[in-house]
Amino acid sequence: MKILLATDGSEHAGMALDFLLCFPLPDDSSVILLTVIDKRVFVDAESVELTAEQSEALHAVHNTVREEAQAYLNAAAQRVSERGWAVTVQLRSGDVAEEILAAAEEAQVDLVAVGSHGSSPVRRFMLGSIATRVLMYSPYSVLIVKQPEAAHPLPGREGEPWRVLLAYDDSAPARKALDLCASLPLGAGDSVMVVTVLTLVTGFRQDIYQHLSPVWQQKKIAAKAALDGAVVRLHGSLHGVTSRLREGASSSHEIIEAAEESRSNLIVLGSEGKSALQRLLRGSLTGNVARHAPCPVLVVRDD
């Protein structure tokens, strides 16, 4: 697997690196470490008439930023190399999100990983503009690493097991997410919970009629059968597989609530739509889960 990790040396970026190093990736995986210097900061400064002394100071600051970024990349690369993965580094300048997407396209990666803001009840909503844009426009799978809450500690630390929640609706992206989960070399103490959500229309108590409808009952039977099939698929390679069929007015709310209840430390789900426009129009589920999740979120794109 080829992974692009966008990092800037911040706390969130460092957390993303820690999470990635714990991630059960294949041994032959390779990692591209990317840092982007936001060129707009220096362009804005250079657009103002500066004295020779100010220009020299600005140039010195720019060089310092590049040197610090390169030093951080080299240190991070050492950690990745010690993990046993092939690693390369890139230092670019420009619009951060655009450069991340361009680097991913050039390398034809399998996964783009970015750090984002914390996940406390207040900060959880602030996904971050860079992470949001990467999630929206990346044609590749995206891993958003958020600062975990106390109930959702990062796996791999002090024997903390993986507790993966797979949101499954039997769509093509969901089946690809299922295949990815099945391929993870999880241990005996790790677990995967597969969750399927049936959406209820609750206005004017329509959910009562919905429950009584034969169509709804058939839909529920089909969803349960697909859910059972996903569990069988996972049982072939993993231990500790469970499933839940939930009903509610909001799929994203039910997924997040299931993650809270199970203390999941990773949510995996398929993405809606392939094009940027489709993801914009249909990406409310993915965006809501990524924004409000109490733990990292892996959004799997369907090629």
Image: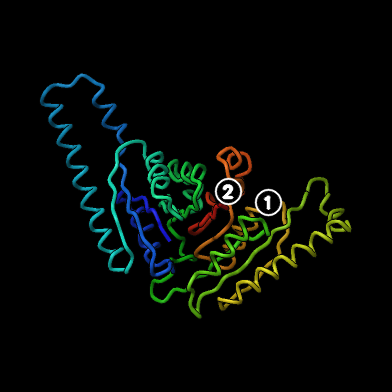
At x 59% / y 57%, what residue is drawn?
256
SS at mark 2 in the image: helix
Quadrant into which the N terminus falls: bottom left
At x 44% / y 44%, what residue is drawn?
128
Where's residue 92, x and y in %?
A: 29, 42
Q: Quadrant of residue 275?
A: top right
At x 58% / y 39%, what residue is drawn?
280
Q: Number of callouts in the render?
A: 2
At x 58% / y 60%, what residue is drawn?
176
SS at mark 1 in the image: loop
Mark 2, other Cα within 10 Å: few <14 / some 14–19 / many ≥20:
some
Q: Label 1: which residue?
A: 250
Q: Are marks 2 and 1 in contact (CB under 8 Å)?
A: yes
- Residue 147 drawn above or below residue 93: below
Of all residues, the one furthest to the left in this rendering is 53
Of all residues, the one furthest to the bottom in this rendering is 188
Q: Nearer the viewer, residue 77 or 216?
A: 77
Which amino acid type is shown beneath numbered disc 1?
Answer: Ser
Where's residue 298, x and y in %?
A: 51, 57
Where's residue 278, x and y in %?
A: 61, 40
Which amino acid type is shown beneath numbered disc 2?
Answer: Asn
Give the numbered dot on residue 288: 2
